[in-house]
Image (tube, rainbow, N blue to C red):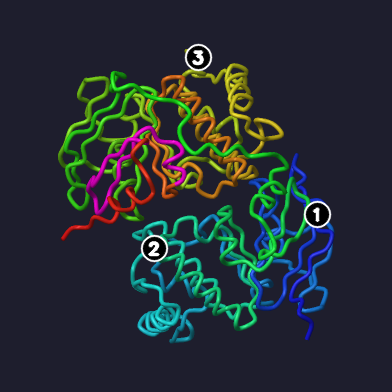
Amino acid sequence: MSAQLLRMEGISKSFPGVKALSKVRLDLNYGEVLALVGENGAGKSTLMKILSGVYQKDEGEIYLEGNKVEIPNAKAAQEMGISIIHQELNLMPDLTVAQNIFIGREPRTGFNFFLKEKELNEKTAELLEKLNINLNPKETVSDLTVAKQQMVEIVKALSYNAKIIVMDEPTAALTESEIKTLFDLIENLKNKGVGIIYISHRMEELKVISDRITVMRDGQYIDTLYTKDTDMKKVISLMVGRHIQDESRPTTTVSKEAETVLEVKNLSTKNFLENISFTLKKGEILGFAGLMGAGRTEVARAIFGADKIDEGQIFINGKEVKINKPEDAVKHGIAYLSEDRKRYGLMLEMDVNSNILISSLSNYVNWLTFVNDSKGYVTSEEYVKSLKIKTPSIKQLAKNLSGGNQQKIVIAKWLAKNCDILIFDEPTRGIDVGAKTEIYQLLNELAQQGKSIIMISSELPEILRMSHRIIVMCEGRITGELTNEEASQEKIMDYATRTRS
């Protein structure tokens, strides 16, 4: 048997106005982890969607175990032993964990009409135990955290007897312990001869988990390197085609006398948050750190009116305000960029122009309620230029852009609304190293312009790099506050693990 499990040669793919792939090649061996890297928009996800039957190639050839194959749809890919865990979660929120994992393959009775729920849950429990994953088969997926939903995706892919598993940013929403569990699973799969294509922007992961690294840039194949012989700086250089400046600390300062634009006093929610109090100053980037489930996102959602506050006060520019729903927050100049930008931040089936203008549409409507398209186009073009959004035109659909450019569209939407308090929840999740740098520069520029920013991030180097002050949370409480000068990863983790005795 040849060591080569998969070979893709000369793969090209175009979308309206975009050449996504041009003569790309890739090969994968049995029992290997091949890291596939490149900036957002490099074509990684497109190539994998062709492999998994989601997209059809325009030209090129695919060989599986030495045989030339055509992959007309996702079902055909699964039958060939190809499973993919998409970066965008592909779950049915109203179904249970077990129903999602075995959708279409459920045990049934009575002329295949009645679902054998007990057998389904037992079968799922056995699989979860085998994979050492702590999930309740009966729990509804919509009630799970993003991290646990990601684990459901992984289990669903592993439930097929796959020869090839594609993992697209599988650890983006996972904790350290969950990542270790995933890596243990990957090692087990390698030992069984399964080939894994691993897409990640976390360079430190690649050294740990991959055997080789294939680099793409601008829809083209660049190089394939053996991980053990490779320096990650070289990989980054191949990815971006330019030098990335690494700034370890904020480039601006905020004086103690700076105006307080937001003050939260004793904010509590019935089921989780407890006496949350902090201030945010003009031109400040206030970082929120903590482990998964610490309550950072819950604080953001409470301030924005997405979740109900049971106790506490919110003051904006010294005046107490009542925020019962997101519309109230927006009226007071507060914007919230969710960690799940595709679900809560974007209208993927609409164009760039519509997405940018949606929150400020009233500014472009005349007394006859007609939309002034030309005025709106000017605004959208200005933000596309100033934020360096890579798009063929403002008429391009948002779903066709890379993750980094989609994030910039969400930022543009709130800047067009002229919000002064911006809450960024995991602003660089799923974004490559080059786009991260652009987002960092943009956040610093916004702070310099007098915008005030709350930044929630699970990446400690990012928190240290960007934040003037850092709030640390654990189990729904604030357990520490640090200035950037006194903060370190060790101190943050100390506060982040101060659980209740």
For the C terminus, the image quarter is bottom left
Neighbour tally class for label 2: few under 14, some 14-19, many 20 plus, Cα within 10 Å:
many
Disc 2 from disc 3: Cα separation: 44 Å
Q: For residue 12, which numbered disc appears in the image?
A: 1
Range drawn in magenta: 461-484
| Residue located farthest toward the front when viewing the structure as drawn | 486
| Residue, disc 3 | 366
Q: Is residue 301 covered in magenta?
A: no
Residue sitting at x 60%, y 47% = 432
Residue sitting at x 55%, y 60% = 205
For the N terminus, the image quarter is bottom right
Q: Earlier in the sequence, mark 3 or mark 1?
A: 1
Question: What secondary structure is marked by label 1?
Answer: strand
461 w.r.t. 183: above or below: above
Residue 284 at x, y percent in the picture: 38, 27
| Residue located farthest toward the top when viewing the structure as drawn | 367
What amino acid is found at the position of numbered circle 3 in the picture? Asn
Residue 219 at x, y percent in the picture: 75, 49
Residue 455 at x, y percent in the picture: 40, 38
Residue sitting at x 48%, y 18% = 363
Which of the 4 image quarters holds residue 246?
top right
| Residue, disc 2 | 141
Disc 3 from disc 1: Cα separation: 46 Å
